[in-house]
Amino acid sequence: MSMEFGLRRNNFFYKIIRIIGQVCFPFIYRLKVEGQEKIPLKGPGIILPKHQFWTDIPLAALAVPRPLSFIAKQELFLYPVIRHFLTALGGVPVDRQKPLKSLDSFRYVEQLLQKGDFIVLFPEGTYYPHSVGEGKHRFIQRILRFEEKMGWNENQKIPFIPVGICYREKKFRTEVKVKIGQPIYSYGKMDGQEFTRRIINDIATLSGLIKTGGTESRIQA
């Protein structure tokens, strides 16, 4: 499926939905955000959150005080009404099984980065409740190549910002802590797999999860 590129994120609609989320989510979650000052006020960036549940998506939007575009699996865009809704909120479909079918989406993301937009990419690729996935490096590798092709200097480097999300079990209004980490920058020719591993390690630490000998355990976040 190819994206309808006549459609773009509608910033007014995005703002309205975000306000609705700010009003409604406190009835379900007690959201605590740390590290918002690490988000650059201008320029492009990649937000890389932990992915445990579907609620990570609106929580990321509430935690980051800038409009976002979200990389999402193309299966979510199959039905026209849902596709229009998600696209207006900044959704960008990607076919994880057949990356060649997502070339238009990759090019669109490059355009967004050139405009100075922020992109949300869940590097684990799917849900890993209470554990940490190995991480998918293909999209990150493509962004690194794009950055290299653009020849941006050190002051123009794209910040890759890991974000931890920790759900604390409560009977009523679960506490969710979102911890925004220090931006990571690429220098020279970076290996996508190695860079992704570093991102995943930071996400695990921020989420209160550590990987030990191929297993996962929880630490105090």
Image (spheres, rainbow, N blue to C red):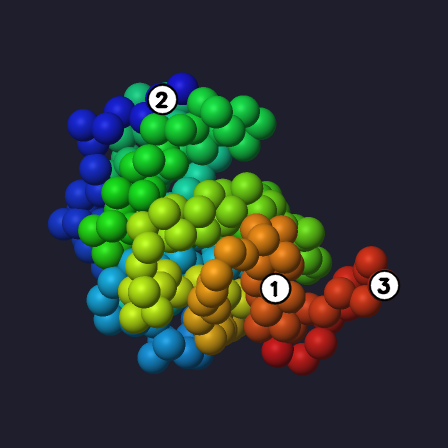
Q: Residue at x 41, y 78 (%)?
A: 35
Q: Does residue 209 appear left or right of residue 35 in this picture?
A: right
Quadrant location of residue 211? bottom right
SS for dot 3: loop
Circle 3 is placed at which residue position?
213
Rendered location of residue 170, percent (x, y): 60, 69
Number of marks drawn:
3
Asked if disc 3 and disc 2 are in contact, CB closer than 8 Å, the reply is no
Instruction: Say which of 180 and 188 sits in front.
Output: 188
Rendered location of residue 39, percent (x, y): 34, 71
Please name the amino acid that badge 3 sits on: Gly
Please name the amino acid that badge 1 sits on: Arg
Asked if disc 2 and disc 1 are in contact, CB closer than 8 Å, the reply is no
Q: Does residue 56 appear left or right of residue 106 in this picture?
A: right
Instruction: Say which of 142 and 57 sits in front.
Output: 142
Circle 2 is placed at which residue position?
2
Please name the amino acid that badge 2 sits on: Ser
How far apart are labels 2 and 1 at the CA level? 32 Å
Rendered location of residue 193, percent (x, y): 62, 51
Of mark 3 and mark 2, the one earlier in the sequence is 2
